[in-house]
Amino acid sequence: AQSVTQLGSHVSVSEGALVLLRCNYSSSVPPYLFWYVQYPNQGLQLLLKYTTGATLVKGINGFEAEFKKSETSFHRTKPSAHMSDAAEYFCAVSVIGGNKLVFGAGTILRVKS
Amino acid sequence: GAGVSQSPSNKVTEKGKDVELRCDPISGHTALYWYRQSLGQGLEFLIYFQGNSAPDKSGLPSDRFSAERTGGSVSTLTIQRTQQEDSAVYLCASSPWGSGGYNEQFFGPGTRLTVL
């Protein structure tokens, strides 16, 4: 079975500061990893995914995430936070042949001006 | 093109009543998923459809919950004899094909269910 742990249910950063959202996973087989964002009263939008190949995945708006097998992590970073980045972010895992996403508990990102 | 749509967007019901939640997936997507998002439980998988069949119902929390999909398109999630603990946001997602694990799932805006 797979599981996801997101460290920090709330993260607060100043505008322009580095953003680090942590995600660790547990999987007995090679995982596929995803980051989704959810704005208030909206559904989930895919931001990044790792399936195979390059372990550093780049998304829109300057966010990127790196798959580290040795650390079972898929942390997401952005060098400079913007007010529009404020939202709730979910890390999720799936596996080859799998048919569902297993989500972490989510991290609410607050950006202070 | 149109994304995944869900109706109603909000539903308030009384304990013990039955409710039906509807999902219209993206046209041509063969796989459809239902998830539940609630305080304290996070995002939980409920059921997966491939076409009209449901090979994975493992997430349905009780036999009060059922779902069907017709014509390989629209899906309905039915909750019978609703309880207060059923209050949550019910999210539907679709993807172009099913098993593979790497397929992006496109989510609808959800139905917020409140059981009084």
Image: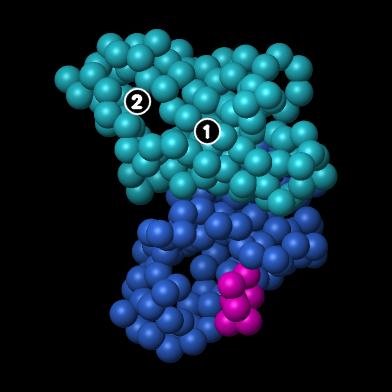
Chain colours: A cyan, B blue
Q: Left or right: where does residue A34 sit relative to residue B41?
A: right
Quarter of the image for the N terminus of chain B: give it: top right
Q: In terms of image quadrants, where is residue B87?
A: bottom left
**Structural distance between the alpha carbons of marks 2 and 1:** 18 Å
Q: Mark 2: few, some, or many residues within 10 Å (few <14, many ≥20)?
A: some
Q: Which residues are magenta?
A: B60-66
Between residue A57 and residue A20, name the one nearer to us. Answer: A20
Quarter of the image for the C terminus of chain B: give it: bottom left
Q: Is residue A99 magenta?
A: no
Q: Chain of mark 1?
A: A
SS for callout 1: loop
Between residue A14 and residue B6, name the one nearer to us. Answer: A14
Q: Is residue B106 at all visible to an observer of this figure? A: no
SS for callout 2: helix
Q: Which residue is depicted at the point 37% across and 41% down? A: A9
Which is more N-terminal, label 1 or label 2?
1
Q: Left or right: where does residue A80 sit relative to residue A26?
A: left
Q: Which residue is mark 2?
A: A85
The answer to whether marks 2 and 1 sit on the same chain is yes
Q: Are marks 2 and 1 in contact (CB under 8 Å)?
A: no
Residue B56 x/y as whole percent: 75, 62
Q: Which residue is depicted at the point 77% across and 34% down? A: A30
Q: Chain of mark 2?
A: A
